[in-house]
Amino acid sequence: MPRTHLVLDSAFTVGPVRRRLFGGFVEHLGRHVYDGIHEPAHETADEHGFRKDVVELVKELNVSAIRYPGGNFVSGYKWEDGVGPVEQRPRRLDLAWHSTETNEVGLHEFQHWLDQVGSELMLAVNLGTRGTQEAIELLEYANIDAGTALSEYRRSNGRQEPFAVKMWCLGNEMDGPWQLGHKNAEDYGKLAAMTAKAMRQIQPDLELVACGSSGASMPTFGEWERTVLEHTYDDVDYISAHAYYEEDDDMPSFLASGVNMDHFIDTVTTAADHVKAHKKSDKRIDISFDEWNVWSIKRWEAQAKTFTLDEWPVAPRLLEDVYTVADAVVVGGLLISLLRHADRVASASLAQLVNVIGPIMTEPGGPAWRQTTFFPFSLTSRLANGTSLQVKASGDTVDGGKYGEVPVVDSAATVEDGKAAVFLVNRHQTESTTVTIDLAGLAVEGDVHAEGVWDDDVHAVNDLGNRERVGLRTNETVRREGDTITIELPPVSWTAVSIG
């Protein structure tokens, strides 16, 4: 049986765990908004048409900041279409996803939904087909109290107090040739800097995110970050990162996806720190990892429907991945990577939340349910508080596919006010792994409890026909004797151990 030994000590820390690390992402894509969070005819719908059963699940997921309204969608979006009387709003062609956008849900309605789920708005502006002028007009509409044309327009639309949006994304994936208004790093950097300066003339204390690479496989990765930050370093607070992972008939590599995320984060921080040194700046740029998840991209590309000129459906079923136990284990592993870099990852957004590669699924007129990936996110968001610790690990390794030999157990830990949590992934496909945890360096008393996700069938799913096939399971093997915890992790499993 493989073995791993972990040492936790309060003297060895990574940094504070910021609540925005457990953010989400809602895009006008497929059935995410319409027939997802918003379905006026549903028996649970509130007076604004939002499904209360979905609200309760999002609250249980414990999501902090939610990025909106895209995504690729935002690069063709006119924010003005989503305000004013709903019956007067225009229907538009959404070129990003070849759909029809009804604009029934816009800024006001989405803020109402955020108020129900208890999450903060993280607003993206269109720097694809629009620019600086439209961005500052949206800022005036959203954040100025009263006395200007656009703030008074907001008040006439029923919102007296400002939206007070703090965090803003300056476009989306502008390095991608698929993006409406795609730009090279030089042109985007100049536009982002100009827009950031203009927005700060209205509100200096905004938190602004410049677009980083849309993936580590992009040919401009690294150089894009350097060039963009050369233009924007003094004007923004964060650089974005996006990453998606899929099994692709290579389970060893899939289970080691966190190795790739670690490298991605390290490369982006290196690029940012290079610009910092070049500019002789005292300021530090952190990361907004505002898109990450497991997503079967190759399957999507193979199945993607080509619509005709006359076909622009409303809320078609797009990107509705059904997640397995293995997918949930990898999501838990990616959360471990984010915690391990809590000093530089200030914000992260699970992409996305409902129906569209989401931990929550719905059926029109029917139920809403938790996918397998729901569980590691909700439990980590609840337990990971205070300070992220440097976990000193030693033990056996396992084949990580294209990543070579990797630790059989991946781990992260947090501590706050006499309580601690340890997050563990066993990457071995056939054998359980025994883990011992040395707590001598932590002042943490009390009992231990362990829950996680695993199954004899790593491809088991929760679907409409069996919505509760997979859930959190208690690991009864966990024991504490003095300052030592022992636990046996099942193969292909994610586990959270709470202490105190």
Image (cartoon, rainbow, N blue to C red):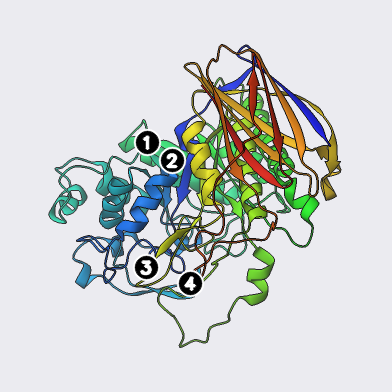
Question: Label 1 crowding class (10 Å Cα cut-off): few <14, some 14-19, many 20+?
Answer: some
Q: Secondary structure at mark 4?
A: loop
| Mark 4 vs 3: CB contact within 8 A | no
The N terminus is located in which quarter? top right
- Tag 2's secondary structure? helix
Task: Please state if 389 lies on the left or on the right of 199 as rendered.
Answer: right
Residue 218, percent from left and from top = 70, 54
Q: Residues within 10 Å of mark 2 (few under 14, many from 20)?
A: many
Gap in angstroms between the C-alphas marked 1 and 2: 6 Å
* Mark positioned earlier in the residue sequence (4 or 2): 4
- The residue lying toward the viewer, choosing from 29 and 310, is 29
Dividing the picture into quarters, in which one does residue 494 lie? top right
The picture places residue 102, in percent across and down from the top left corner, at 33, 72
In this figure, which residue is indicated by the disc labeled 4?
A: 95
Picture coordinates of residue 376, whole percent (x, y): 56, 44
| Label 3, label 1: how far apart the Cα atoms are | 34 Å
Would residue 366 be found to the left or right of residue 257 on screen?
left
| Image mark for residue 34 | 3
Viewer-proximal residue among 252 and 150: 252
- Label 4 vs label 2: CA separation? 26 Å
Give the number of the disc on residue 200: 1
**Amino acid type assigned to the residue bearing label 3 in the image:** Tyr
Q: Which residue is mark 2?
A: 196
Q: CA–CA distance between discs 3 and 2?
A: 32 Å
Q: Secondary structure at mark 1?
A: helix
**Height in image: 147 above or below 393?**
below
- CA separation, marks 4 and 1? 31 Å
The kind of residue on which mark 4 rests is Leu
